[in-house]
Image (cartoon, rainbow, N blue to C red):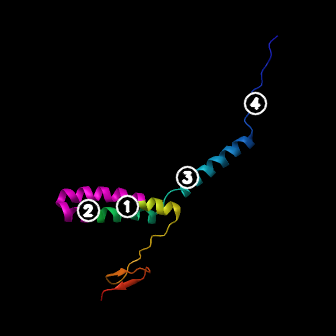
Amino acid sequence: MNKARIAAAPSPAGLAFRLVFAAAAILLALLSLPQAGHAQGIVRGAQEGSYEGNRIAGPVGGAVGGVVGAGVGGAVGAVEGVLGIPHRHYRHRCHGYYDGYHRFHCYR
């Protein structure tokens, strides 16, 4: 007695579920890519690092400073971008000092 086996055809619902899951995974991967604004830390870090390294130690220092500045600038930019921390500079327009009450006084 030979028993015939019937192979089950893939259900269209299972195929549709896989396609929706794959599309969602691709969309999530595209949304997690950094925007062009987040890459600014790398470029500026390399520029400032190479400038300071070249000023202090000559051409070799410029090359090393550029590499280190790009690494640090990229890391800081990535952390600030991921956490959403705005980069603010608190600078005074004059030279001065803080008194005991944490108030800033200008020399000029």
Q: Measured from the top left, where is residue 6 in percent x and y?
A: 77, 25
Task: First in sequence, mark 2 or 4: give its number.
Answer: 4
Residue labelled with disc 1: 73
Point out the residue furthest to the left here.
58
Residue labelled with disc 4: 8
Magenta-highlighted residues: 51-75
Give me the C-alpha separation between circle 4 and circle 1: 57 Å
Q: Within the magenta stretch, is there residue 52? A: yes
Of the two numbered discs 2 and 3 in the rendering, the one whose residue sits closer to the viewer: 2
Q: Is residue 37 left or right of residue 57?
A: right
Of the two numbered discs 2 and 4 in the rendering, the one whose residue sits closer to the viewer: 2
Of the two numbered discs 4 and 3 in the rendering, the one whose residue sits closer to the viewer: 3
Magenta span dominant secondary structure: helix
Under tag 3, what secondary structure?
A: helix
Point out the residue furthest to the bottom here.
108
Point out the residue furthest to the front here.
100
Residue labelled with disc 2: 50
Q: Is residue 23 above or below residue 39?
A: above
Under tag 1, what secondary structure?
A: helix
Residue type, label 3: Ala
Give the image quarter of residue 18: top right
Give me the C-alpha separation between circle 2 and circle 4: 66 Å
Point out the residue furthest to the top here.
1
Task: First in sequence, mark 2 or 1: give its number.
Answer: 2
Residue type, label 1: Gly
Question: Mark 2 packing: few (<14 Cα in 10 Å), some, or many (20+)?
Answer: many
Task: First in sequence, mark 2 or 3: give its number.
Answer: 3
Q: Within the magenta stretch, is there residue 47? A: no
Residue type, label 4: Ala
Task: First in sequence, mark 4 or 3: give its number.
Answer: 4
Q: Is residue 48 above or below residue 11?
A: below
Total marks shown come to: 4
